[in-house]
Image (cartoon, rainbow, N blue to C red):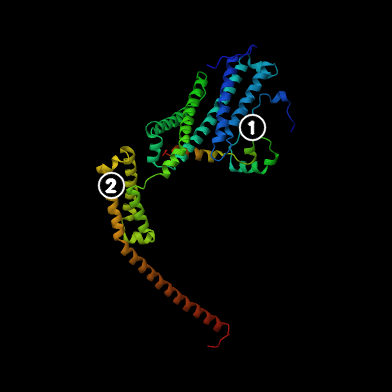
Amino acid sequence: MKLKRWQDVLTDDFPTAKPVTQKAVDLALKEGRRFRGSMRVSTGRMWTDRDFERFRAKVLNTPLP
Amino acid sequence: MAAEPTHSVPVLYADQWARLVEIHNHAKSVFLCAEEFDPGFLEFVQPVMELRNGFEHIIRAKAAELGMNGEADAKGSEYVPQSLDKAIGHEYRAFFDAADWFSVCIRDRIAKTLDQYSHEHIVAVLPDYYTKLRPQIDQTSRDIAAIRGSKDISKDKDLLAEVASYRAAIDRLLGAYEQIEKSIPALVNARQCRPVHAEDRIKQDITRALEPYSQECIAAVIPDYYPKMRPQVDKTCREIGELRVAKGRDAVLEDAQYTAAIEGLRTVCEQVQDSISALVDWKQKSRWEAFKVWVAVAFIGGILIAVTSGWILVKFGLVKP
């Protein structure tokens, strides 16, 4: 496999983002030292898709006092 | 419509760029705030992914403007505005993802903050909470859900107006939370100064009377306690609390419904008090029964061990029969 020229990738899309799973969070945590982006992501502090949906449903279904 | 750009250098597709800038910064503003409000200080990566995709379309549009994008030449003059529209679409989705995250976090905070205080304290400190604030928070949550539900991007849709509408809904939620947050010292103070009400005392009496006995014992002696009496006590206490909130602390004492509810609680308390001797008897009887079972088990176990040991000794010839 060869690298494409920049002109050839100008209209290519990035790979579709996969759902954020616990496995992805664990991997981010494991490889955190290589990562130079968000501190939260590099320390594994991010929502997985499933956890966020659960949290959202719980909050919206909880009546206010 | 987007705000009029104030630049002096002519820019191609200025209106689209202005909309892009405005929506992007709304999204950023909400995202930054949501990061601070998240209960576990977790990152939500979905808006970032949308920003990444939006950036991709911006690069394609700029490349077309500079004559560096071969596909643009084939597609004609519509390529750049179409790419910018796609970028705006991604910014729009990023805004909604961030805004949804933020609104959920702030509602969670409101619920957790107020959960520690009774209805009476909340009314005493925030008199318009039940009449204005809570309906407003609920309405805002419904508005947000409705806007989020119609998150499709059609060409004729005024995206900026929709973003502004969602932003206003979030500002209302934030305003409500700030009002509640400012009331926390007064709520704490009200809780500390709370007088012990008649229903609390009666409930405490019931709890103390039943504390030394197991659930099994209580269920055996007072069969109605768990299915009827205890739910009735909780319900009555709640109703008295609501009555006190509705009528006022002093006026409620004259209310016939209040008097009847307190009488009902006293009757339950008396029933429990009358059952104490039966509960004590049941507990002693239960201990005696348990002791008998233990002795029987120990006796049978001892016999079994003795028989097994004897059989092993005889089997291996260690002892002659």
Residue B78 location, x and y as percent? 60, 15
Looking at the rendered structure, which numbered label has been put on residue B119? Answer: none
Looking at the rendered structure, which numbered label has been put on residue A15? Answer: 1
Report the chain holding disc 2.
B
Instruction: Find numbered disc 1 in the image and state the secondary structure of the residue it sits on.
Output: loop
Choose top left, top right, bottom left or bottom right for residue B33.
top right
Choose top left, top right, bottom left or bottom right for residue B61.
top right
Instruction: Find numbered disc 2 in the image and state the secondary structure of the residue it sits on.
Output: helix
Report the chain holding disc 1.
A
For the residue pair B66 and B195, the one nearer the viewer reads as B195
Q: Residue at x 57, y 19 (%)?
A: B19
What whole-number distance in Å separates the C-alpha atoms at marks 1 and 2? 66 Å
Residue B10 location, x and y as percent? 64, 11
Looking at the rendered structure, which numbered label has been put on residue B261? Answer: 2
Q: From what the image shows, is residue B118 above or below residue B88?
A: below
Residue B259 location, x and y as percent? 26, 46
